[in-house]
């Protein structure tokens, strides 16, 4: 398949590239060190550990051997490949949250730095995670601080809380300085084409959840399609305003009659808005909030001529709100909250055409974040829900603000950002117990795999059936305990596997005096080690006595250089432990199952036994902290937050407080669903632009 990506701009020569990389590294370390220092982290050892980790991450991600198609941060998590305890999981969740917040706060400034580093490093396919100055490198530094601090979990989390705020405030400035450094040395940004949408979209991510790209500005495209449909060539230049006080300054030819008509239109919209709120309603934090009918205002409702710019604006916005009201994912309460902003935004669109031209217009971001804050809420969620209450309060305040000329929406955008961050963090914290359940289950599954592999090799050349039976029934349990304790590299595994090997050797015929002397010397030690292993798994003296007696006979025959003597197994009674079925040496069952403990439940959809290879990024480039709609079964589709991913198996844990369980699934399954369009990255869908694209699709239908 041909590659349609535009070529990268020319990169600096090797000498210049080296100097630029070194300068970027120094600036990145110095500025972040100052930010961390000003946050109250005064211990030199913590600042030094942070700086070293930043440098290591930067060097690794900027190395001459890129892993463009894989997870560039895979090696950054190497220090956490061991199974984590409760405290480590809490810290991992918190640091991942901070990384997500940093990506949001840095927005376009972060995106520009990546585009220039793509040129500098000559990597047209570099992912966001591969940016040497990206949040992933900063998170690596935060882990170094946590390890070096040596404090309790509460102290460590408090330290991270103290660090996060100044990072969020000052990181955009740092990225602008990095951008200026590279630009001043002639490093051009790579083309945004072929770059993941998350790089260029800013805070709202303007991309479809299936990994596809929306039009650059679907709202402007929709408006132009409306003009063509209405057969008019009248256009509103970007940035031109029809507002009362600005119209003559922007376009002196607008006559007084047009201004009177515009004022009349705005007055009619205001009257319609007042009328729509005159009936009773629900309460948000003790105040009455009247419900609005979920229907959009069109030019025909105000008897406007179809070809007029104002009519096109109204009908364009009407189509967008119709798409929002038709969304199957939003609860009716959230649709009602957004509906309260319909007429205020209509008036804003008429007086401020940059709403159509600017994809980052605050009003568009507001709608996007309202939807983002409500992701995953059940369709039946009522106003009593805390999230709905806060969203209702925001829309009430915004409605009054939009009537004031020049009023800023930044405080409300910040409030929604806080709501999004608090809700996501609460959901991830609520999964800590589920994650431990998954970790323990997968640890057991991996241990089963190790023991089964060991059994196949060990039983391949067994000299006596009694020994084979003993190893299958009992010593495999000893090996399982050793595998859980430390894996195949652990001391117990090495010792217990050596004991099994010596047990097998001890019953083989001894043809030389040297072998007989060795057996006589090790016999008592071997019995002690066998006894210790059986003690470990709780085998009683009565259970082990028949085998130990038989072992004595076999070893005696071996000393006489005799082959093992076949015997008839002793008679047993029903329920006798010695009647236990031989261990199944096939692979452990890794299919779907339900894990339960302490009232927690996890629907585990399957686990890969062997460690997962570096994960090839899916088209949507999902990560921990994203909300996804995915298929749990052939008949069930769920929407949940990606709360954690195993660094060893790749298993993903997803959760939604609306469920009574968590879902664990292989990352490969999630990748396949996203690639096939079965799953969607819903937290990266910008509702306003998605609604415009949906309206455009309907408009273009024959």
Image (cartoon, rainbow, N blue to C red):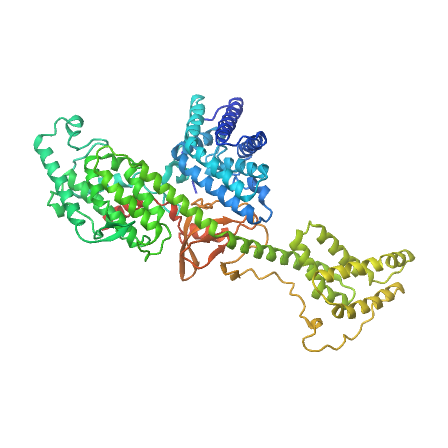
Q: Is residue 700 above or below residue 172?
A: below
Q: Is residue 45 visible?
A: yes
Q: Position of residue 624 (x, y in %)?
A: 47, 46
Image quarter in which the N terminus is found: top left
Q: Taking the image as drawn, is residue 231 in sight?
A: no
Of 573 and 613, the residue lying toward us: 573
Residue in the image at 51% along x and 55% along y = 434
Residue 166 position in % (x across, y down): 44, 33
Rendered image quadrant of residue 397: top left
163 relative to 294, above or below: above
Residue 635 against residue 140 in the figure, above or below: below
Between residue 238 and residue 399, name the one nearer to us: 399
Residue drawn at 72 percent across, 50 percent down: 491
Near-viewer residue (65 or 625): 625
Tally of numbered discs: 0
In this rendering, would 210 be left or right of 55? Answer: left
Residue in front for this viewpoint, 235 or 261: 261
Q: Position of residue 551 (x, y in %)?
A: 81, 66
């Amino acid at each position: 398949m041909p590659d349609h990506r535009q070529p990268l701009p020319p990169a600096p020569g090797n000498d210049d590239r080296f100097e630029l990389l070194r300068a970027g590294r120094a600036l990145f370390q110095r500025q972040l060190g100052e930010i961390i220092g000003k946050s109250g982290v005064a211990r030199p050892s913590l600042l030094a550990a942070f700086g070293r980790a930043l440098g290591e991450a930067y060097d690794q991600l900027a190395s001459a051997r890129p892993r463009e198609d894989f997870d560039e941060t895979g090696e950054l998590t190497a220090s956490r490949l061991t199974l984590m305890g409760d405290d480590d999981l809490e810290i991992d969740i918190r640091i991942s949250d901070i990384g997500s917040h940093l990506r949001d706060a840095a927005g376009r400034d972060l995106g520009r730095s990546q585009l220039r580093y793509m040129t500098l490093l000559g990597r047209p396919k570099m992912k966001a995670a591969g940016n040497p100055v990206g949040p992933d490198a900063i998170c690596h530094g935060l882990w170094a601080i946590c390890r070096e601090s040596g404090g309790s979990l509460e102290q460590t989390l408090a330290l991270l809380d103290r660090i996060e705020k100044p990072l969020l405030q000052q990181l955009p400035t740092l990225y602008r300085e990095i951008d200026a450094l590279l630009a001043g040395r002639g490093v051009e940004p790579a083309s945004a084409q072929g770059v993941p949408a998350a790089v260029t979209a800013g805070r709202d991510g303007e991309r479809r959840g299936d990994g596809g790209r929306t039009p650059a500005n679907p709202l402007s495209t929709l408006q132009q399609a409306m003009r063509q449909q209405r057969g008019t060539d009248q256009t509103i230049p970007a940035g031109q305003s029809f507002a009362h006080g600005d119209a003559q300054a922007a376009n002196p030819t607008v006559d007084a009659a047009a201004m009177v008509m515009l004022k009349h239109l705005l007055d009619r919209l205001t009257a319609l808005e007042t009328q729509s709120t005159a009936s009773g309603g629900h309460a948000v934090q003790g105040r009455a909030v009247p419900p609005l009918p979920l229907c959009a205002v069109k030019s025909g409702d105000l008897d406007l001529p179809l070809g007029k710019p104002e009519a096109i604006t109204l009908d364009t916005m009407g189509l967008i709100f119709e798409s929002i009201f038709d969304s199957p994912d939003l609860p009716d309460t959230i649709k009602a909250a957004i509906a309260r902003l319909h007429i205020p935004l209509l008036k804003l669109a008429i007086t401020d055409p940059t709403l159509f031209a600017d994809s980052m217009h605050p009003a568009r971001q507001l709608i996007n974040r309202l939807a983002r804050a409500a992701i995953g809420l059940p369709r039946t969620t009522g106003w009593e829900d805390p999230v709905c209450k806060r969203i209702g309060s925001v829309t009430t305040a915004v409605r009054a603000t939009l009537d004031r000329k020049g009023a800023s929406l930044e405080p409300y955008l910040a409030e929604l950002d806080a709501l999004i961050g608090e809700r996501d963090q609460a959901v991830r914290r609520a999964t800590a117990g589920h994650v431990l359940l998954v970790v323990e289950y997968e640890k057991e599954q991996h241990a089963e795999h190790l023991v089964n592999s060991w059994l196949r090799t060990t039983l391949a050349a067994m000299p006596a059936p009694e020994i084979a039976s003993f190893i299958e029934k009992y010593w495999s349990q000893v090996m399982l305990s050793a595998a859980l304790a430390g894996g195949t590299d652990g001391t117990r595994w090495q010792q217990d596997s050596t004991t099994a090997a010596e047990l097998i050797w001890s019953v083989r015929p001894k043809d030389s005096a040297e072998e007989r002397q060795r057996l006589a010397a090790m016999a008592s030690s071997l019995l002690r080690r066998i006894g210790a292993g059986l003690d470990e798994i709780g085998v009683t003296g009565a259970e082990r006595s028949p085998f130990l007696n038989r072992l004595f006979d076999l070893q005696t025959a071996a000393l006489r250089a005799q082959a093992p003597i076949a015997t008839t197994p002793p008679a047993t009674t029903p329920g006798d432990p010695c009647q236990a079925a031989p261990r199944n040496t096939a692979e452990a069952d890794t299919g779907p199952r339900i894990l339960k403990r302490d009232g927690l439940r996890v629907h585990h959809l399957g686990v890969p036994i062997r460690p997962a290879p570096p994960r090839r990024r899916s088209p949507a480039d999902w990560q921990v902290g994203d909300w996804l709609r995915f298929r749990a079964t052939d008949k069930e589709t769920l929407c949940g937050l990606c709360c954690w991913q195993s660094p060893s198996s790749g298993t993903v844990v997803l959760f939604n407080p609306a469920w009574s369980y968590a879902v664990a699934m292989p990352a490969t399954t999630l990748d396949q669903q996203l690639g096939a369009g079965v799953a969607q990255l819903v937290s990266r869908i910008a509702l306003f632009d998605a609604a415009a694209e949906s309206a455009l699709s309907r408009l273009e239908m024959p």
